[in-house]
Amino acid sequence: MQAKRQLAILGSTGSIGTQALEVIERHADRFSVVALTAHQNVPKLFEQVARFRPTLAGLTDARFSLKDVPADLRFCRWVFGSEALTAAAALKAADTVLVSVVGMCGLQSVLTALEHHKRVLLANKEALVAGGKLVMEAARKAGEHSLLPMDSEHSAIFQCLQGAAGNPVERLYLTCSGGPFRTWPKADINRATREEALRHPTWSMGQKITVDSATLFNKALEMIEARYLFNVEPSQIQVLVHPQSVVHSAVGFADGAVIAQLGTPDMRLPILYAMAYPERLPTGGAPLDFFTVQALTFERPDPERFPALRLAEMCLAAGGAACCILNAANEVAVRQFLQPDSGKPITVGRIYTVVEETLRRVGNLPADTLTQVLAADRLARETAQSLLP
Ligand code: MG
């Protein structure tokens, strides 16, 4: 009987957090939950705390305090504000930290967990996109397999690499559904609205990532993550538009072999794979049925209609804080895009121009320390905001 993994889940009420808890319940003999944090979904967090009985619980929204917590849930330690993430990431009782928070707070959480020699399961984009160099340095110090991806594409690549057996990697194939605008003309994409962007064809996810999947900024961020996580040159990463979302990604090796990971679009697999690594445990999801898959098709991404990929390549080539700036500008623009009643609606085209113009105005900045990364992030956000209505 193997020792149970002791998990701290940062961002437990989001899409990844809730699915992680679902697979934990299925494999209760293998995992226990020692910490849970949420931003402001209080009812859901209370429900999870009552069910999983962690030793630490936290709400990162600083408006909350212990008086908001019902008496019967005060059996654990409660932490409020940004401290909640640090406390959970450094918690002594945790050996594994799942970082599924959204935003730059993920970077600090990942660094804290790695400094405390935890295994980090990464479901936060900002950590590697904004602080790729810093995070990979911290991961090297923390030891082998201290940072495992949970994103479906990076998990797929990581799974394919298990079959490398010394075969050098030539190319990473990062698949992409193409999103709801895959076949749209450029002018229509640029005019597209919030409702149109939120109609993702294959995956059901949070709103920010759904918009990013429509603009392909999600794939742009994933290219940046892959470059750091797998230590490859940007030119070794090929994005493949694959509308069926069956091939989750693939690796091309020096001997000509291509190994791909296939499956139904079910996040529980990459979640559980990272949680149980190097073991593989059943998720309970439906297996892939090859006979219902009519065809697997692959298209070259179009940088004219989807400038996000071109911008990511540019930022990777520029180095420094360029990727951090791209991410920050996109986040600010998408936030405004998602505001339903702001009275200042913006279109998809505006997201691209805000990111491009922010990159131009901010220029390149160093990103060798956390302070520098946070400063670049702040400046990019201010700049992007000033470009919005
Ligand atoms: Mg993904």
Image (cartoon, grey):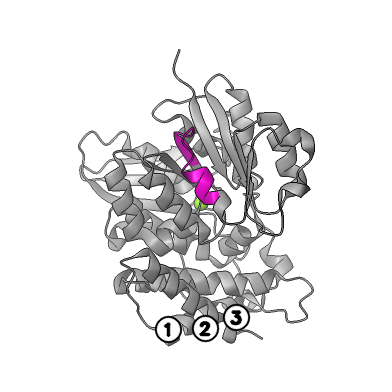
Q: Which residues are magenta?
A: 85-97
- Name the disc covering residue 350, or none: 3
Neighbor class of circle 3 (other Cα within 10 Å; few <14, some 14-19, many 20+) is: some
Q: Secondary structure at mark 2?
A: helix
Q: Is residue 164 visible?
A: yes
Mark 3 secondary-structure assignment: helix
Q: Identify the disc placed on residue 249.
A: none
Q: Are marks 1 and 2 in contact (CB under 8 Å)?
A: yes
The Cα–Cα distance between marks 3 and 2, rounded to whole angstroms, is 14 Å
Quadrant in the picture for residue 189: bottom right
Whichever of labels 3 and 2 marks the residue nearer the N terminus, that label is 3
Label 3 vs label 1: CA separation?
Answer: 18 Å
Residue type, numbered disc 3: Arg
User: Residue extending furthest top?
Assistant: 1
Q: Residue beneath label 2, please?
A: 383
Above or below, comparing residue 361 to residue 226 in the picture: below
| Quadrant including the C terminus | bottom right
